Image (spheres, rainbow, N blue to C red):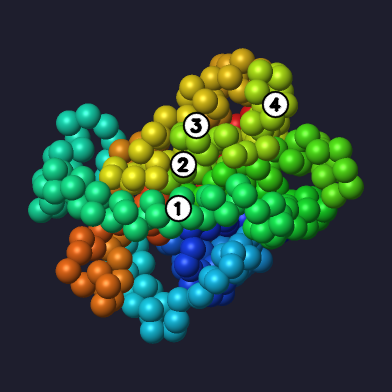
């Protein structure tokens, strides 16, 4: 039976800049997702390749001052690194998902990697990653003109998809996760033109990857901070399924459990049925093998960066959830 994707949209929201040009980033993300799905569902992957309109990028990097897109030479090298991640996903299949407990050490040892060295290596990229994250976060918090411009691509993509009667999946990484959270909150609660007419629209699947939303300081810059202890206005009300993904050694999402700040209170407010445990779920201690592109400034430094989006996009659990979304298998 043919797979009908005419009313499906996957909107992709990137994280920290700098970034490849929009077209290149869109292509790389789309490739990661499609190849992830291909491991278990060849027919669906082939259908996706024939329907690129399913994918949309809420690209916001150019809305930040002084953003310089990665050049063509860098993008070419980046494509090789992304292909390497996809090859590993295909080679080890579902074992790509690490799991928890003692399995973690065995997983990395079997691949010639020492767990302690992996964690220590992650710390060597911490300064660069966190400086970029804090710089962009401060800008988002302090300059509402720029923050509005950063949110606008996603708001426009959602309005377009919903106006066409499409079901939506949002895949957000890093800073893109709290941009998305803010946007969903605005569609849930703002009573002005451009928002109120979409009040009853919902996002079928929301995946947060490498998210800093576990940090109270990040939650304190969001719109919802003005509505603490005010019931339903504390949270977005338009999410059907929400999964949070955190990779081992990711310094941005090290506080990875969303149960206390989000999942449990949202269940108590009856946004989600209590007897459906998979509506809200944390996947943590995941394996992200991404190695950064070598250049003059990092030639002698640790090359692994478990925060990068490409290692998240090929996670087996994410592939399964996106497949179920596309095949209408998400159970209400």
The answer to whether one can see residue 123 in this image is: yes
Q: Which residue is mark 4?
A: 227
Q: Earlier in the sequence, mark 4 or mark 1?
A: 1
Q: Earlier in the sequence, mark 3 or mark 1?
A: 1
* Dot 3 and dot 4 residues touching (CB under 8 Å): no
Q: Earlier in the sequence, mark 3 or mark 4?
A: 3
For the C terminus, the image quarter is top right
Q: Please name the residue shown 38% across and 74% down the image.
A: 79
Q: How far across and how far down the image is residue 316, in percent?
A: 39, 47
Q: Please name the residue shown 71% across and 23% down the image.
A: 232
Q: Say above or below: 274 vs 145.
A: above
Q: How far across and how far down the image is residue 205, in percent?
A: 60, 42
Q: Which residue is mark 3?
A: 216
Q: Say above or below: 2 vs 243.
A: below
Judge the density around disc 1: few (<14), some (14-19), many (≥20) Cα neighbours within 10 Å. Answer: some
Q: Which residue is mark 1?
A: 133
* Dot 3 and dot 1 residues touching (CB under 8 Å): no
**Front-lying residue, 115 or 223:** 223
User: Is 105 on the left-hand or right-hand side of 305?
Assistant: left
Marks 3, 2: nearer the viewer: 3
At mark 4, the secondary structure is helix
Q: Please name the residue shown 52% across and 55% down the image.
A: 136
Marks 2, 4: nearer the viewer: 4
* Dot 1 and dot 2 residues touching (CB under 8 Å): yes
**CA–CA distance between discs 2 and 4?**
20 Å
For the N terminus, the image quarter is bottom right
**CA–CA distance between discs 1 and 2?**
9 Å
The disc placed on residue 212 is: 2
Q: Please name the residue shown 14% across and 48% down the image.
A: 117
Q: Earlier in the sequence, mark 1 or mark 2?
A: 1
Q: Say above or below: 276 vs 246.
A: above
Judge the density around disc 3: few (<14), some (14-19), many (≥20) Cα neighbours within 10 Å. Answer: few
């Amino acid at each position: 039976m043919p797979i009908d994707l005419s009313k499906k949209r996957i909107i992709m929201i990137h994280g920290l800049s700098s970034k490849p040009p929009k077209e290149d980033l869109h292509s790389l993300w789309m490739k990661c997702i499609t190849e992830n799905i291909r491991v278990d569902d060849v027919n669906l992957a082939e259908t996706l390749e024939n329907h690129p309109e399913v994918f949309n990028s809420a690209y916001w990097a150019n809305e930040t001052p002084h953003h310089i897109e990665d050049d063509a030479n860098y993008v070419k090298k980046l494509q090789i690194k992304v292909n390497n991640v996809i090859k590993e996903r295909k080679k080890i299949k579902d074992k790509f998902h690490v799991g928890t407990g003692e399995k973690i050490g065995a997983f990395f040892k079997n691949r010639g990697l020492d767990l302690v060295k992996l964690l220590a290596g992650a710390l060597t990229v911490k300064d660069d990653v966190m400086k970029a994250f804090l710089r962009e976060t401060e800008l988002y918090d302090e300059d509402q003109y720029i923050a509005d411009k950063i949110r606008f691509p996603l708001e426009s993509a959602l309005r377009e998809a919903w106006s066409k009667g499409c079901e939506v999946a949002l895949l957000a990484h890093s800073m893109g996760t709290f941009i998305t959270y803010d946007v969903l909150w605005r569609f849930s609660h703002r009573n002005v033109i451009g928002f109120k007419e979409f009040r009853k629209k919902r996002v079928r699947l929301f995946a947060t990857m490498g998210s800093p939303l576990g940090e109270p300081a990040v939650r304190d810059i969001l719109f919802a901070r003005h509505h603490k202890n005010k019931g339903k206005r504390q949270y977005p009300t338009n999410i059907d399924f929400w999964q949070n993904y955190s990779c081992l050694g990711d310094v941005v999402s090290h506080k990875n459990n969303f149960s206390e700040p989000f999942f449990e209170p949202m269940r108590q407010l009856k946004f989600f049925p209590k007897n459906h445990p998979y509506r809200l779920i944390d996947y943590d201690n995941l394996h992200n093998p991404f190695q950064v592109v070598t250049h003059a400034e990092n030639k002698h430094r640790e090359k692994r960066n478990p925060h990068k989006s490409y290692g998240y996009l090929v996670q087996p659990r994410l592939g399964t959830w996106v497949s179920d979304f596309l095949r209408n298998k998400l159970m209400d």
